[in-house]
Amino acid sequence: MDLGEVERLREHLGAFVAEVFASLARKDQRRQGNCYLRGLMLDGRRKSVQPMAERLPDGNMQALQQFVSQSPWDHTPVLRQIAGKMTSAFAPEAWVIDDTSFPKAGDQSVAASRQYCGALGKRSLCQVGVSVHAVTDKASSPLSWRLFVPPDWDDRDDVRRRRTGLPPEVGHIEKWRLAIDALEELISWGLAPQVVVADAGYGQSAAFRHALRSRDLDYIVAVRGDETAHRHDAQPETPAYGGSGRRTLPRYRTDSVALHELAAAGGRRAFRQVTWRQGSRGAIRSRFRVLQVRPAGKIPRALAAADAGGSASWDGVLPAETLLVEWPPDASAPTEYWLTSLPPETAVRQLVRLAKIRWRIEHDYREMKHGLGLDHFEGRTWRGWHHHVTLVTAAHAFLTLRRLDPKAETPA
């Protein structure tokens, strides 16, 4: 947006800021929040504090820097307000979990470490944020964020922790656990749970899927084709007790096999064509198959035994999950795999729509990074990172509401 366009939205933006930043007690904080959002939406190559302040007629670099990096306002009530407003504006069909990277030039920014950086496609120095988004095919919005703390930041005597304000109680937690924590928070806010969608970085974890099931959250998550499983109709057997020694526990007498082998059994004839949405170039379609499997391995076995109260009382039956497989017409073998808690009789088109709905998140990240400066923040602190991503989320939410109903007042 140019300055004229941003100025024409000031009244609507002011109403939006008054609502979502109502938890900020001071007027000057809300004023700086309004200013920061305008800076994010205004055209400009860099969206860090100094260039934004220089582009705004009322921009004050020192005031904006203090507001985003040092001011002690709590970002959580702001995100809660945004989440409630956005889920009321469009009824989400899924909660999509993803993560995004923030490349860094030095390791003094909070939680910056050498790790896989999706933005660069390789291991590099970066921060990683885990996010949960409310999604439909037509609209989406981030709801919650978590900053991933790598293991090398766990040293409580690390001078970087003190410099960046990393709270003493915060340490390394796996990304999937951060995602579960965010989902629990959303539910505690009173939001209606949706089907959880995630890529293989999360879906490959049997512990993550188990955590969702134990919270009665349905899911459809990507997995790799080399994940192993038993056929749904496979049954464990318990050998007859010989009368001495420890009893033999139930076990499957056939070996588990890779999902790609189970999926390919029956050949192309087992797959059917599905059209799940209209893209910019017309209908998007491919070929899919649905079957039930029992994921195998040490972790699924341990989790199933724990659910039964221990190995001695477990009947050896591994939980069944529904497997969705894609085999494109121009591919020589199946290419994509998803495990879901949804029943196998669920309409295939619905399963495919949900599995593929992650495309909306790429749209979110693209707008937030290239248009709103999500990864332009140069502050180094824990507080500053959370403030900045919250402000970017607010700017994204405001623009999404304008697209959904450009003539409506914000708020209603």
Image: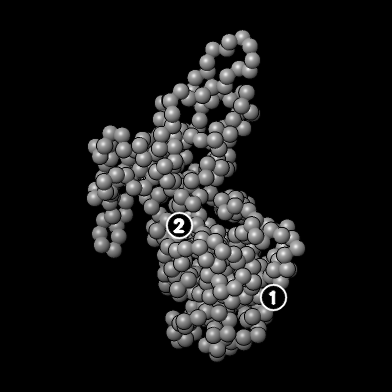
* 313 displayed left or right of 335: right
> What is the x, y in percent for residue 233?
41, 26
Residue 188: give x, y in percent of width and height: 63, 52
Q: Is residue 14 left or right of residue 405?
A: right
Q: Earlier in the sequence, mark 2 or mark 1?
A: 1
Residue 232 as seen in the image, left or right of residue 330: right
Which residue is disc 2 drawn over? 135
Residue at x 31% of width, y 54% of height: 277
Residue 349 percent location from the top left of the image:
33, 46
Q: Are marks 2 and 1 in contact (CB under 8 Å)?
A: no
Q: Is residue 129 visible?
A: yes
Q: Secondary structure at mark 1?
A: loop
- Label 2: element kind: strand
How many circles with numbers are drawn on the protein?
2
Residue 411 at what x, y percent from top left?
Answer: 53, 69
The residue drawn where x is 64% and y is 71% is: 108
Q: Write down the quadrant of residue 211 in the picture.
A: top right
Residue at the limit of the structure toward the top, as seen here: 243
Decide: is 45 above or below 155.
below
Label 2: few (<14), some (14–19) or many (≥20) C-alpha neighbours in 10 Å: many
Tell me the amino acid under the disc marked 1: Gln
Q: Which residue is mark 1?
A: 70
The foreground one among 365 and 149 is 149
Quick one: quadrant of the N terminus? bottom left
71 over 252 or under it: above or below:
below
Residue at 47% in and 63% down: 122
Amino acid type shown at disc 2: Val
